[in-house]
Amino acid sequence: MSFTVVLVGRPNVGKSTLFNRLAGKKLALVDDTPGVTRDWRSAPGWVGGLSFTVVDTAGLEDVTDDSMEARMRRQTEMALERADVALFIIDARAGVTPLDRHFASILRKSKTPVLLVANKTEGKASKSGLYESYELGLGDPIPLSAEHGEGMADLVEALLPYAPKEDDEAEEDAAVVEASGEGPIPIGDQPETEADRIKPIQIAIVGRPNVGKSTLLNSLVGEERVLTGPEAGMTRDAISVDWQWRDRRFKLVDTAGMRRRARVDEKVEKLAVADTLRVIRMANVVMLVVDAEAILDKQDLNIARMVISEGRSLVIVVNKWDIVEDRAMALRQVEDKLEAALGYIKGVKVVTISALKGHKLDTLLDAVVDTYTVWNRRIPTSQLNRWIEGVLDHHPPPLIEGRRVKIRYVTQVKSRPPTFALFVNKPLELPESYQRYLTGNLRESFDLPGVPLRLLLRKGKNPFADE
């Protein structure tokens, strides 16, 4: 059983840098601009033999109204309540600020144990700030440099008392077995749960700014997990949440809004968009959330084409459907735009919802599972070769300089997305138009709607040729 460590402190003291250091990956956006992190995010952490869950939070601000900073503070307080221990981080080079003193007084009253961390202690400029930190009343500070990895041994020593004892866990397990009246279960014979057999479906929630991506994630998981509000560009970091619906497990990832490249000028926004692209490449299913008042504009279609080109499966989510008056006309617009822009991907599922009111979320998840199933589908080689024989009889390849390209056989070489190898005698001479015909016929014949299909041309080895 692991424990949870939450990182708190005012903006720009190095919380996200320490988070990346403990997670062993560059998961959180890091920049000199204060307030880059807005939502709390978690990841498995490991340092010095200790394993735990590490949680990065937004910078603490002394506000309690309905502003974005106040909502960020409430998110941080929620993460703090769920943690086993908190690391209160200060910037030793800047010294102890009034804001540090204010939140130190609040944290001293918290039920969660607090360890004081003096970050950025590399160099002589940090000495005075390190000595000042004793006045916060949170015990001896732990000096470290998150950027350079210095002081990690001291941090491990301070965290050790909060790590669960292996002996205690063994005693608890034995007590459970004794109370149940059953003997120990051999390791190889432990029953496998349904969750163990099914890997989580990784879902990326993407779209333009302010279309309701974060509201959708909150509605799905049933709590205010990420910040929402009227401000565009609220989400910056990609926030992942493990969640279960019916008998399926999901990893939901909320991402930053993607504007047209010409409009992206701030460094932080560029980093956020790059993070979104990384999430798309790792996803199984991409939910493209669009605004019902501006359905599938140019940027929406650009994102959809990018998702398809990356080989990801796509579900289009029309949000704010409850405010649409002429719904029949809106659906016709969706169909026309999809046909014009993505006509080569027939059958992309379109689901109309209201994320704010929670309407039709089950329908959306059914569409996600169906699309994921198609994206994973494998077709036996025998069926594929019977299919290609029928295609060649009905519509053979065109003649090239009086000769016809010979297609020998076809097989599926991978799924996710479905990828097929077509063995021909002259791969370079098979026209692209005929390849598109084969792909469309393959999609229709084997019921593969709404997912990208890849056709790889291969030249079979001639057994009669001299080696």
Image: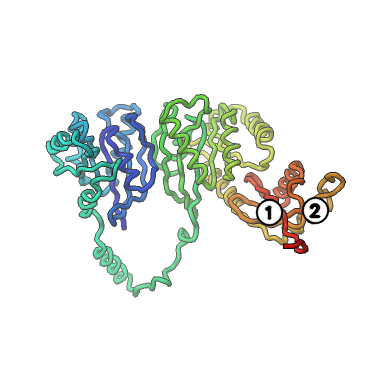
Quarter of the N terminus within the rendering:
bottom left
Give me the residue at 42% from left, 34% from top.
235
Q: For this view, does 50 lie left or right of residue 351?
A: left
Judging by the rendered image, the residue that carries numbered circle 1 is 421
Q: Which residue carries the number 2 mark?
A: 406
Point out residue 164 in the picture as x, y percentages from the top left corner.
25, 58
Helix, strand or loop at label 2? It is: loop
How far from the left and from the top, in percent, is residue 64? 27, 29
Q: Residue at x 81, y 48 (%)?
A: 397
**What amino acid is labelled 1 in the image?**
Ala
Q: Secondary structure at mark 1?
A: strand
Establish if 413 lies above or below 212. Answer: below
Q: Residue furthest right?
A: 402
Amino acid of disc 2: Lys
Label total for image: 2
Marks 2/1 in contact by CB < 8 Å: the verdict is no
Q: State the residue at coordinates (55%, 46%).
A: 368
Near-viewer residue (124 or 379) = 124
Image location (x, y in percent) of residue 446: 70, 52
Q: Quadrant of residue 377?
A: bottom right
Q: Is residue 109 visible?
A: yes
> In this rendering, does residue 224 appear at all?
no
279 or 17, which is in the foreground? Answer: 17
Instruction: Give the residue drawn at x 49%, y 61%.
Output: 197
Please report whichever mark, 2 or 1, sits nearer to the chain's N-terminal start: 2
Q: Residue furthest bottom?
A: 183
- Quarter occupied by residue 103: top left
Q: Estimate the spatial distance between the alpha carbons at disc 2 and disc 1, rounded to whole Å.
A: 14 Å
User: Nearer the observer, disc 2 or disc 1?
Assistant: 2
Q: Quadrant of the C terminus?
A: bottom right
- Colour convention of the picture: rainbow
